[in-house]
Image (cartoon, rainbow, N blue to C red):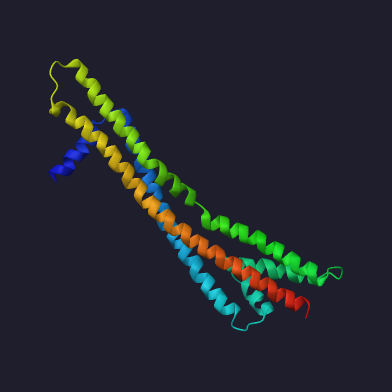
Amino acid sequence: MQGELQVWQLVLDASWMVKFVMLILLLASVSSWMIIFRKRQVLNEATKRAENFEERFWSGTSLATLHQEMSDTDPTGMETLFEAGFSEFTRMQEQRKSSADRAVEGAERAMRIALTRETDHLEHHLSFLATVGSTSPYIGLFGTVWGIMTSFHALANVNQATIAMVAPGISEALIATAMGLFAAIPAVIAYNKYSNQVERLELRYENFKEEFSSILHRQAHG
């Protein structure tokens, strides 16, 4: 308990620049953890919905029936690709001037656009985690350097320097480094984990798009 109070006292006694650095790192850490929990929920839900949709898609249900079911819900992820592709395919087939190949090309184009939007949604805020993970140690190091510089500058006004005179300043400076690592490490771990999960989801969406395009091509030329 005494150690905790000493650390808190060092933070309160720190120079204004070191306090400013600590505040930035604290805000970065809090924001990172909010994104980490939210992104975990989004990616887990996207994976679960992709698995459920693939099971329904390959269960033998007709495309028209499946599309009707999608219209009654709020599609997302792989469902969005299917809805965009099938809607465009149906619309172009209803046009007498549209050939089978043009209908398939229109569906592929609609799915590419939907895939881009879904990818952007999955990758949202990942760049912030990467930024926090790469810059926080350097921000903390800046606070450390400033605190040490301030401590040694104070020694210029005394005749005899002792370790007790510089220890508090160096301690408060090292706290900034510790806070930088505390903000950076979770952000880096989460970024690597979620980036890998996003890549696997994107590959899954891409494979579905190709398979669905083949099905539409066979149906159009049937």
Report the residue at 53% width, 75% height from top: 52
**Where in the figure is residue 208, as x and y percent of width and height?**
61, 70
**Where in the figure is residue 126, as x and y percent of width and height?**
48, 52
Position of 65 compared to 195: left or right? right
Position of 111 compared to 52: left or right? right
The answer to which image quadrant residue 135 occupies is top left
Report the residue at 59% width, 83% height from top: 59
Asked if one can make out residue 126 in the rendered structure from this viewpoint, the answer is yes
Indicate whether 158 appears above or below 98: above
Report the residue at 25% width, 21% height from top: 153
Residue situated in front as seen by the camera: 147 or 53: 147
Q: Residue furthest right?
A: 97
Position of 45 compared to 182: left or right? right
Q: Residue furthest bottom?
A: 60
Query: Which part of the image, by quadrant, shows the C terminus?
Result: bottom right
Report the residue at 29% width, 38% height from top: 176
Residue situated in front as seen by the camera: 145 or 116: 145
Indicate whether 143 appears above or below 28: above
